[in-house]
Image (tube, rainbow, N blue to C red):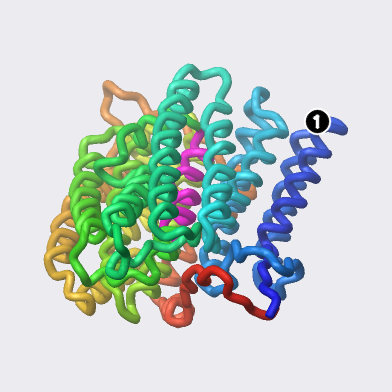
Amino acid sequence: MMSFSFLPNAVLVLCVGALVQMLGVAIGRNVARDAVIGLLVLVASLVAVSMPTVLYMAGSVALFAPDVWASYSAVLIILSAIAIHIMSWRNAVVSDATVGSEYYLLLTLATLGGVSMTGAVHDVSFFLGLETLSLPLLGLIAFRNGRIDAGEAAMKYIVLSGVASAMLLFGFALTYLETGSLRFIAPNTGDMPEPLLATMGTVLVLSGMFFKLSAVPFHLWLADVLEGTSIPVAALVAVLSKIALFAAMVRYFASVNLYMSGPATNEVIAVAILSMVGGNLLALVQTDLRRMLAGSSIAHIGYLLVAFLSPGPLSFASSAFYLAAYSVSTLGIFALMAGIMPQGTDIRDWHGMFRRRPMAAAAMSIMLLSLAGIPPAVGFFAKFYIAAAGMAGGRLGLLLILVMSSVIGLYYYLRVIRIMLMPAPVERPEREVTSPWFGNGALIAVLACVTLLFGVFPGTLVDLGRNLIVMPSPPPGSSGQP
């Protein structure tokens, strides 16, 4: 029987859309027009996710999996990209003359890379997606041409990205040497003549993914990168790239029994513990909101790894729910920074915000309460769901650390709310705040409402998570019919 592969609709739409954007830039630069085209491309790719696949390739190697996990992750990535696009409008089109049409082209390409990674079942398709995400990110991080710290952030990012890519490729090479296959799946070392090579390859691949996820101890300069780049691009690094990498990691280990002790499992346990504790401690001492959110994102990766290490019916469902909750809450904070105080991300600049901008302060409080895991925000149920998965998987030690580290997180999240309630000290005058443009204001309102609604009525997301299926890479020579 003839074998078939396919190209996901969203990948196809984003590829065509990127070509259209390139053509628009070549014909004549118009930032407002190119911004609208970029937004239309993202919306079209979101619609395409739910449509029947249109492009099949006969007699080719399977590169992507047609499963619900890939579709769910792609929807989260595209929705995040749309939110980042909206919060970028004022800086890229109105305020900053150094930002051109390439900004939105790079955003589309980064989204293309992230969507490609979520369904990849072949080492080549995964790595191409990873680089398609990483290289535009490098350009976006350095896009603030007038600031020297943007160049520093880009240099630090390229070092981290290069090391991670090298580790991934070395790991793929060792795995291929042992298995003779480029399937994007952790090899089963139990029935191999030389399991050491496959084990080393798996550990290297996992370490490369942890570099990209910025998990402790692979986090290094994440806080510097988020501080040096613009607020929308910082959101791209903290949210979109994390969704893509975690979704790919779940697929890579979909066929591995993580109950069994081994080098890979032990590494994930160690990284989960270090990320939960180290991420919260890093955020605890920060005075810049972006640096605080860098530590927060590291801690939340640690929480997600608890569900990842708890195989069972709740593992995928709780991970999917937590990804959505984290994305909505974090994007909301970045949208508030971009709309209210784009030039002042120092936490002390938010003194008296409840008096100056009560609605914005209320929205910020909702997002912070969600990240802290306090009801009625969605983050409370997300952490509860993770805890349920951990209990079902017998990860009591990890759950104890999750609870203890979450207590640390309460301090720095609630500290921001306390600062917004207090007037500014005499020696530090209040920084001027701006009013968000209509689109960014609507985005903030929607994210705040979603954070509350899914916290009070989480049933829809829970039911959706229960139906998620992660299909491992098909074995070589397998065939299927479209």
Q: Residue furthest front?
A: 193
Residue 206 among those drawn in magenta: no
Question: Can residue 241 be found in the magenta stretch?
Answer: yes
Taking the image as drawn, is residue 384 in sight?
Answer: no
Residue kind at label 1, given as amino acid type? Arg
Report the residue at 39% width, 75% height from top.
Answer: 317
Image point 37% across, 63% down: which residue? 187
Please report the bounds of the magenta region as a residue range.
Answer: 230-247
Q: Residues within 10 Å of mark 1 (few under 14, many from 20)?
A: few
Q: Quadrant of the N terminus?
A: bottom right
Pinpoint residue 358: horizontal percent, then vertical percent.
43, 49
Question: Which residue is pictured at 58% across the width and 51% down the height?
Answer: 81
The one nearer the camera, 32 or 475, is 475
Quadrant of residue 186 within the rendered picture: bottom left
Name the outermost residue toward the right: 27
* Residue 435 image position (x, y, % from top left): 56, 40
Give the answer, above or below, for where 341 lies relative to 474: above
* Percent position of residue 106, x then y: 64, 39
In front of the other: 223 or 207? 207
Q: Nearer the viewer, residue 460 or 90?
A: 460
Dominant secondary-structure state across the stretch colored magenta: helix
Residue on which disc 1 sits = 29
Q: Is residue 271 left or right of residue 301?
A: left
- Residue 211's spot in the image, x, y percent? 36, 43
